[in-house]
Amino acid sequence: GYPPLALHPAAIKLNEPVTVKGDVSSQFLTALLMALPLLDSKSRVEVQGELISRPYVEITLNVMRRFGVEVARREWHSFEVPAARYVSPGKIYVEGDASSASYFLAAGAIGGGPVRVEGVGRDSIQGDVRFTEVLERMGARVSMGDGWIEAAGGKKLKAVDMDLNHIPDAAMTAAVMALFADGPSTLRNIGSWRVKETDRLAAMATELRKLGARVEEGRDSLRISPGKLKTAVIDTYADHRMAMSFSLAALGGVPVRINDPGCVAKTFPEYFSAFASIAAA
């Protein structure tokens, strides 16, 4: 029931729909959708419960379409996968990672900026590009073009109350931005944080308190009331996004030490070098 798993060749035939829980992680669904065309037969996936992180599923469907497999979606409850083979599109543009872009855009909003991120823009197929909506709600100036996004601040950020179920990774960036807001911010519908690299709800609450915030941890929400920023040593729980998110606290003018910074190697090994380059600019 847990790794390591031993996988053996088998003849797989589906005589009934595959069911998958949708309220824990969208990754189970996206993995199935990508694998099912390899069966060379029609199949159907039915989702149990409310499907979270829907933009990530949309990315998967978009890329499958580009490789010749058109999946029919009935709302977000079931997916019909045809008996089709993947076909190379010949050329395909791979965007930069919008989740990683969120840290630099937030830095622009917090530090004044402007900071421009290239490789992802207004026509992105990634759900986390909607982090720009959080930036705008918090008072940042955001501009976008073909393949770039730019953010700038200069004024005190505004507190927000937002449902961030659709951008759970970038929501972590918003949580640290809340330290710089003009009042309490509430991030809602982020219960999927509890089953990530660590229990991110508990971890985020703990580390934000070290920096002087008052934090109320709900079952699937955080209410963050900023206080006077304090020097802190931040634990990362072997979670790359904890390390990258909390680096933004240093823009408040207080020293912040990040334990185990090497955990960022999972997705962005050069993160701290890149962050230092804009912090020194």
Image (spheres, rainbow, N blue to C red):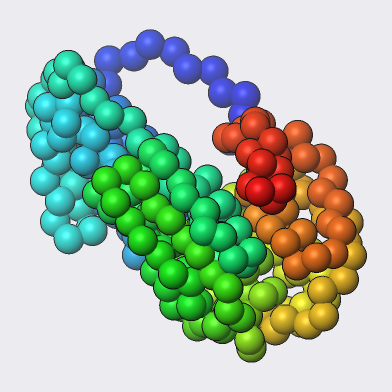
Count of numbered badges drawn on the protein: 0
Residue 279: where, in percent of width, then height? Answer: 69, 50
Q: Residue at x 52, y 45 (%)?
A: 100
Q: Which residue is drawn at 67% across and 75% down?
A: 180
Query: Relative to the observer, which residue lies in front, 280 or 66?
Result: 280
Query: Relative to the observer, which residue lies in front, 41 or 102?
Result: 102
Residue 80: where, in percent of width, then height? Answer: 14, 43
Q: In which quarter of the image is residue 77?
A: bottom left
- Above or below residue 75? Residue 238 is above
Position of the N terminus, as image quadrant, is top right
Residue 196 visible from this viewpoint: yes
The single residue placed furthest to the top in the displayed view is: 9
Q: Is residue 39 left or right of residue 100?
A: left
Q: Residue at x 67, y 79 (%)?
A: 224
Residue 9: where, in percent of width, then height? Answer: 38, 11
Q: Residue at x 41, y 42 (%)?
A: 118
The single residue placed furthest to the bottom in the displayed view is: 183
Q: Quadrant of residue 177?
A: bottom right
Query: Relative to the observer, which residue lies in front, 58 or 100?
Result: 100
The single residue placed furthest to the front in the displayed view is: 281
- Above or below residue 138? Residue 73 is above
Residue 23 visible from this viewpoint: no
Query: Relative to the observer, which residue lies in front, 242 or 84?
Result: 242
Residue 107: where, in percent of width, then height? Answer: 60, 58
Q: In this view, does 211 lie to the left or right of 158?
A: right
Q: Is residue 205 left or right of residue 190?
A: right
